[in-house]
Image (cartoon, rainbow, N blue to C red):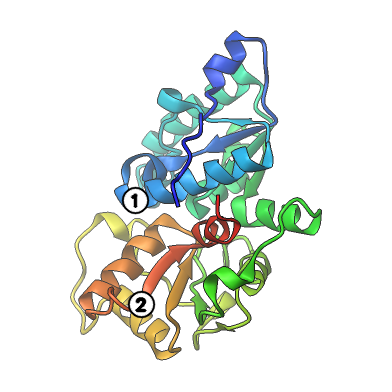
Amino acid sequence: METRKIEIPVMADMAARGEKPEYLFWVGCAGAFDDRYKKVAASFARLLSWLGTSYAVLGKEESCTGDPARRAGNEMLFQMQALQNIEIFNSYGVEKILTICPHCYNVFKNEYPDLGGQYEVINYTAFISEKIESGHIDLDASVLDGAKITYHDPCYLGRANEIYEEPRALLRSLSPNLCEMERNRSYALCCGAGGGQYFKEAEKGEKEVFIERTEEALTTGASIIATSCPFCMTMITDGLKYKNREEEIFNYDIVELIVKSLKI
């Protein structure tokens, strides 16, 4: 199927026309620079356009949230980046922010308010769930042909913000064969990249965390490992390659599966 190109609205262009979108879609560093996660960002943008959502991105004005800096202990850099973002948000009158990264979601929702950044922050799984409940999205489960799916809980979506059911409800709408890993929800194992670990060398030990988690996912017998975080996607994908299973087991972000079902 040929993928139709879509035009992504940019906040500055809309402001120049005297327009203000309902949502700011925060693409995030991974969505902007990581080749694999660019596909996830594009999938969500495609879904937003298909729904007719009033949204825009910052484009070249978007910077990092500062979350990695704070996790790594550089508080000054975090506050500099956060205050710069808050100034840009306020200049455009941003009230609602859509995120595809749990780390961005968490820092906007729980840490920016301390610096004066008060916004309604919405994770994309909750946004899509609401659109399904309101009848704006009708998924075609036959597209995945009953594939067995397992879901990896991101730390910053699960334990940090207790978003467990929306991702699972979406996956159940796509396939009746959703199977849980032994450790799930609040007991889920980290992918190994959290807390700034993504940016440093592995410490001494018998096994890296991402390998342990990938092995746990493979034990379920699922053909699809669903993720909802760029860090988790990188680590699970690397785990599949380490196990030489990337040709038979696939790692998809939830929104990629949604777009696949809708054939958009």
Left or right of residue 208: residue 135 = right
Position in image of residue 106 (x %, y %): 56, 51
Which numbered dot is residue 180? none
* x and y, in percent, of residue 12 in the image: 53, 16
The label number, if any, that marks residue 249 in the structure image? 2
Confirm whether residue 231 shows in the render: yes
Residue 245 position, x and y percent, is 27, 79
Mark 1 highlights which residue?
72
60, above or below 24, in the image: above
First of labels 2, 1 by sequence position? 1
Q: Secondary structure at mark 2?
A: loop
Q: Nearer the viewer, residue 26 or 263?
A: 263
Q: Residues within 10 Å of mark 1 (few under 14, many from 20)?
A: some
Of residues 28 and 54, which is closer to you in this image? 54
Q: Quadrant of residue 186?
A: bottom right
Q: Secondary structure at mark 1?
A: loop
Residue nearer the viewer, 185 or 236: 236
Residue at the image position 43 percent from the left and 89 percent from the top: 221
Image vertical order of residue 49 relative to residue 47, above or below = above
Q: Give yes or no for contact between labels 2 and 1 (Cβ–Cβ under 8 Å).
A: no
Furthest toward the front, the residue is 1
Is 151 situated left or right of 118 in this image?
Answer: left
Q: Quadrant of residue 252?
A: bottom left
Question: Quadrant location of residue 196?
Answer: bottom left
Type of amino acid under label 1: Ala
Give the amino acid type for the residue marked by disc 2 in the picture. Answer: Ile
Give the answer, above or below, for where 183 lies relative to 229: below
Residue at (49% x, 48% y) in the render: 43
